[in-house]
Image (tube, grey):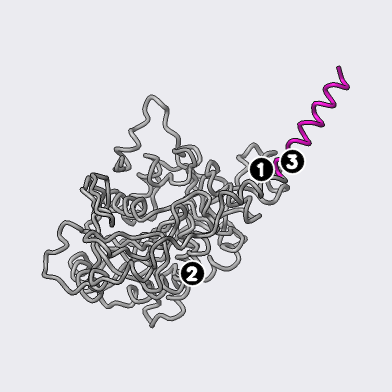
């Protein structure tokens, strides 16, 4: 009996080894280079729709949100769409929340689909419109940068949700870079994110330096955080005596950022004492149930800012011995410094995590949405719904009994499309 059991164990171990060795070969059949496609890219933009003239006031009244994009547009039909291909330049446009629309393809076929109403805008008119709206709302702007595995549809939908959720009557600006919208295109998304660094930092610099920009509330999700943080550093280095303090409220939701890199380099440069004194804050939403960042940890070899994994096994063992959760977080310094002095707050959403991946709690969990909404609205010293932890800058969101759990979709104002 013991011999048969031993043989069985050996066969299982050999099978597991085979699977791991064969995995790259199986994956290579799914993870492929970006296909250029059947249409020349120059043909997508070889139409006057891609170079729109300024239009009369009120043209975009049904498309209230602003978008800046480095996606290649398809201007071959009357309804311009944004593709997953790169563009060498950024373009400006307006959009609305998802709606049921009749869409005609390039081949002339029409069908009803749920889509994002979108129009390209004349560049100068876009800036003029944003200026006018910002000045009507005390110069405040809400800027969102999406993350991995997004299409223009999904990221624009999330932007509209963030605007609704915030409750703020201020301009919503969405930066859309060419994520491929596919699970097995992570490496491509990472490449395109880095390819977009120059374009995004140029846009953020221009936005921050406008005389009518008084405050930028900057929200970045997942891989988008890796695009945003270097851009903020760039603006800081190249700003005038104003010290770019109008980029004041930075929210990183499930950030796919190397946690040690954030501690060693980023926090010290983006959250200098002078900038913290000028009211700059960074809020990080993290979850131990975030499967996407768990995969990123495995890929990159080191923990991510948005997931509280303990890289140091001795630290994990010490926490376990004290009866504490084995969760480790980023810190600004080696000292336990409160948020009002460090400028850094981390919100652990593990106990209220929602969805299959736990990667978007700030848009899917009622407790996280409520907290996120408060932070957007400037509630820096929020305590409601939070529990203190062993670290003064880390708070955990309190779980709610199932029989009292609110409807996540309603609280988060989530569009079910």
**Left or right relative to 100: residue 231:** right
What number is the disc on residue 164? none
SS of the residue under disc 3: helix
What number is the disc on residue 195? 2
**Spatial distance from mark 2 to mark 1, Cα to Cα?**
40 Å
**Spatial distance from mark 3 to mark 1, Cα to Cα?**
36 Å
**Left or right relative to 348: residue 370:** left
Quadrant where the N terminus sits is top right
Displayed quadrant of residue 238: bottom left
Q: Earlier in the sequence, mark 2 or mark 1?
A: 2
In the rendered image, residue 75 lying in the magenta stretch gets the answer: no
Q: Residues within 10 Å of mark 1 (few under 14, many from 20)?
A: some
Q: Earlier in the sequence, mark 3 or mark 2?
A: 3
Residue 110 or 413: which is nearer the viewer? 110
In the rendered image, residue 6 lying in the magenta stretch gets the answer: yes
User: Among all residues in the image, which is located at the extreme right?
Assistant: 3
Q: Residues within 10 Å of mark 2 (few under 14, many from 20)?
A: some
Q: Position of residue 147 (x, y in %)?
A: 45, 56
Residue at the image point whose x is 38% and y is 75% from the top: 205
Residue 62 or 284: which is nearer the viewer? 62
What number is the disc on residue 18? 3
Q: Position of residue 160 (x, y in %)?
A: 28, 52
Main SS class of the magenta portion in the image: helix
Q: Which residue is mark 1?
A: 319
Over which residues does the magenta segment extend? 1-20
Residue 347 or 409: which is nearer the viewer? 409
């Amino acid at each position: 009996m013991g011999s048969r059991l031993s043989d069985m164990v050996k066969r299982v171990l050999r099978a597991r080894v085979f699977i791991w060795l064969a995995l790259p070969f199986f994956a290579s059949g799914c993870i492929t280079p970006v296909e250029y496609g059947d249409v020349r890219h120059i043909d997508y933009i070889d139409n006057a729709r891609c170079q729109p003239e300024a239009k009369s006031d009120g043209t975009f009244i049904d498309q209230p949100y602003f978008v800046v994009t480095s996606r290649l547009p398809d201007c071959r039909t009357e309804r311009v769409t944004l593709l997953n291909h790169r563009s060498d330049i950024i373009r400006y446009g307006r959009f609305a929340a998802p709606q049921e629309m009749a869409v005609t393809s390039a081949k002339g076929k029409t069908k009803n689909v749920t889509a994002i109403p979108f129009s390209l805008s004349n560049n100068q008119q876009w800036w003029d419109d944003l200026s006018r709206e910002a000045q009507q709302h005390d110069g405040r702007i809400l800027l969102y940068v999406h993350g991995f595995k997004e299409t223009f549809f999904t990221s624009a939908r999330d932007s509209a949700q963030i605007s609704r959720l915030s409750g703020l009557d201020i301009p919503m600006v969405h930066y859309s870079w060419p994520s491929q919208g596919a699970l097995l295109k992570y490496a491509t998304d990472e490449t395109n994110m880095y390819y977009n660094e120059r374009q995004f930092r140029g846009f953020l610099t221009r936005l921050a330096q406008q005389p009518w920009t008084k405050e930028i509330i900057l929200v970045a999700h997942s891989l988008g955080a890796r695009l945003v943080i270097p851009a903020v550093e760039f603006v800081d280095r190249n700003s005038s005596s104003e010290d770019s303090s109008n980029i004041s409220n930075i929210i990183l939701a499930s950030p796919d950022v190397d946690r040690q890199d954030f501690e060693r380099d980023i926090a010290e440069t983006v959250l200098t004492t002078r900038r913290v004194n000028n009211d700059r804050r960074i809020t990080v939403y993290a979850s131990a149930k975030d499967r996407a960042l768990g995969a990123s940890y495995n890929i990159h070899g080191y923990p991510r800012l948005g997931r509280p994994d303990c890289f140091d096994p001795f630290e994990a063992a010490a926490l376990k011995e004290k009866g504490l959760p084995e969760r480790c977080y980023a810190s600004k310094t080696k000292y336990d410094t409160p948020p009002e002095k460090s400028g850094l707050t981390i919100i652990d959403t593990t106990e209220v995590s929602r969805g299959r991946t736990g990667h978007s709690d700030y848009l899917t969990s009622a407790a996280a949405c409520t907290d996120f909404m408060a932070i957007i609205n400037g509630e820096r010293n929020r305590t409601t719904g939070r529990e203190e932890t062993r670290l003064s800058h880390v708070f955990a969101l309190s779980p709610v009994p199932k029989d009292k759990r609110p409807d996540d979709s309603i609280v988060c104002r989530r569009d079910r499309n």
